[in-house]
Image (cartoon, rainbow, N blue to C red):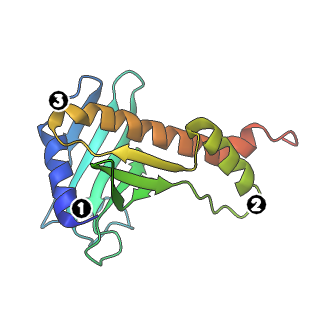
Amino acid sequence: MEKTQAVFLAKHIEKSSPLSFEIKKLVLVSGTLPKFHQWTNGKKVVAGYEITQLDSDTSYYFLFIDWHRNDNYYLVIYTHNKSTTVAEIRQVEEIDGLLQFVWSYNPLKRDGKNDQRKAYFKQMFGTTTVHIKLPTEEIGVERFCEQMFKLCLNRMTADRIVDIFDSTN
């Protein structure tokens, strides 16, 4: 996404006060998040947030970051323990007059079971490609967060589904 889109979205998140989520802004130092994670060190960041879904006490870090240092910004979502990313979203498309994130589930594990993971994800979402409308005002942030948390949950569940249903364990 363009930097202007990342700034626009970050401003809406900052100004919002969703009932179901707590949003804490992360402190940037010279436009970066030092000591956040080895993959983010030195990269330009527009904004970062720790977002907690209050009813489940689930938290993720949302970073608007120049992920590949090429002025193409991503919304990168980290697990709360910062061990890994759950989603790296960069593609924004206008669909029916609305800007939407477009993200595709494409597991790359080396165990030969990625087709099973994709099948589960498709069963949960109806497709392996997810479209999430970008909020155009603060009131839309709650729905946006709900959809992002659903994406994260289904992605992590799909990644682990072969372990859950593996009869050899």
Res 153 visible: yes
Quadrant the N terminus occupies: bottom left
How far apart in space, not on screen, are marks 2 and 1 (Cα)? 34 Å
Res 27 visible: no
Tell me the quarter of the picture where residue 145 sits.
top left
Residue drawn at (38%, 37%) of the image = 59
How far apart in space, not on screen, are marks 3 and 2 (Cα)? 42 Å
| Mark 2, secondary structure of its residue | loop
Residue drawn at (26%, 58%) of the image = 64
Question: In this view of the protein, which residue sits in the foreground, 28 or 102?
Answer: 102
Give the residue at mark 1.
33
- Give the side of residue 134 with respect to residue 38, left or right: left
> What is the residue that sits farthest to the right in this orientation?
168
- Give the side of residue 16 with respect to residue 43, left or right: left
Residue type (three-letter) at the residue carrying disc 2: Asp
Closer to the chain start, of discs 3 and 2, is 3
Residue 100: x, y in percent?
33, 50
Quadrant the C terminus occupies: top right
Give the residue at mark 2.
111
Question: In this view of the protein, which residue sits in the foreground, 57 or 77?
Answer: 77
Residue 151: x, y in percent?
47, 42
